[in-house]
Image (spheres, grey):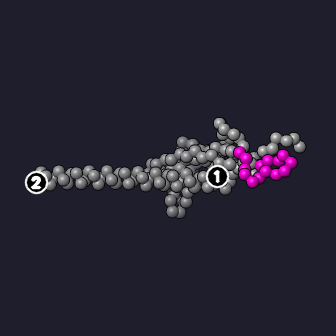
């Protein structure tokens, strides 16, 4: 009888642990999906002349003020886009292959870094990703006109 009780406790403990792990993984997937949605929105709305316009509004500490991923199917997943900025290290511009034109004119892309946070309030999960991206083509020639 004691052996059966011990086996029952082991099964109960193992299944409870599996459920907790599964719930954590589900929450992290939903939070990452929300961050990915934020990245797509940032790319759609990016304006190099108005960097703060690419960021989302809402309190940084209150995720319920962030935009929802999809209010109809997943109202608990939200994202926040911080203001894109020039990188703190490395080149500010990168040349693009195939965009060199005669006469000393050279084209490339300007570099930016942005942090995007995804969260799911139902699972209390949160994921932050740092993304570097390029905008171009922009002229990167050093010639005076």
Can you give x and y, in whole percent of width and height, for residue 54 in the image?
A: 67, 49
Residue 113 is inside the magenta segment: no
Q: Range of the magenta residues? A: 94-107
In the rendered image, the residue lying farthest to the bottom is: 72
Check disc 2 and report its element: helix, strand or loop: loop
N-term mark: 1 or 2: 2
Q: Which residue is identified by label 1? A: 42
Name the secondary structure under disc 1.
helix
Horizontal side, residue 79 vs residue 86: left or right? left
Q: Which label sits on residue 131?
A: none
Measure how far apart labels 1 and 2 are at the Cα level.
62 Å
Give the prevailing secondary structure in the magenta stretch: loop
Look at the image and tell me in which quarter the C terminus lies: top right
Tell me if I can see residue 96 in this picture: yes
The disc label shown at residue 1, or none:
2
Is 132 left or right of 71, judged from the image as shown?
A: right
Q: Residue at the spot x=48%, y=55% of the render?
A: 30
Find residue 7 and report its horizontal and vertical position in percent.
Answer: 18, 53
């Amino acid at each position: 009888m004691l052996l059966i009780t011990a086996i029952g406790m082991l099964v109960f403990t193992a299944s409870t642990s599996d459920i907790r792990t599964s719930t954590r993984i589900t929450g992290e997937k939903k939070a990452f999906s929300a961050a990915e949605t934020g990245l797509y929105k940032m790319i759609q709305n990016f304006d190099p002349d108005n960097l703060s316009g690419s960021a989302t509004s809402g309190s940084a500490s209150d995720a319920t003020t962030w935009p929802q991923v999809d209010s109809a199917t997943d109202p608990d997943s939200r994202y926040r886009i911080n203001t894109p900025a020039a990188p703190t290290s490395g080149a500010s511009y990168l040349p693009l292959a195939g965009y060199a034109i005669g006469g000393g004119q050279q084209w490339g892309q300007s570099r930016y870094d942005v942090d995007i946070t995804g969260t799911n309030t139902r699972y209390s999960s949160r994921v932050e990703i740092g993304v570097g991206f390029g905008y171009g083509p922009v002229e990167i020639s050093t010639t005076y006109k």
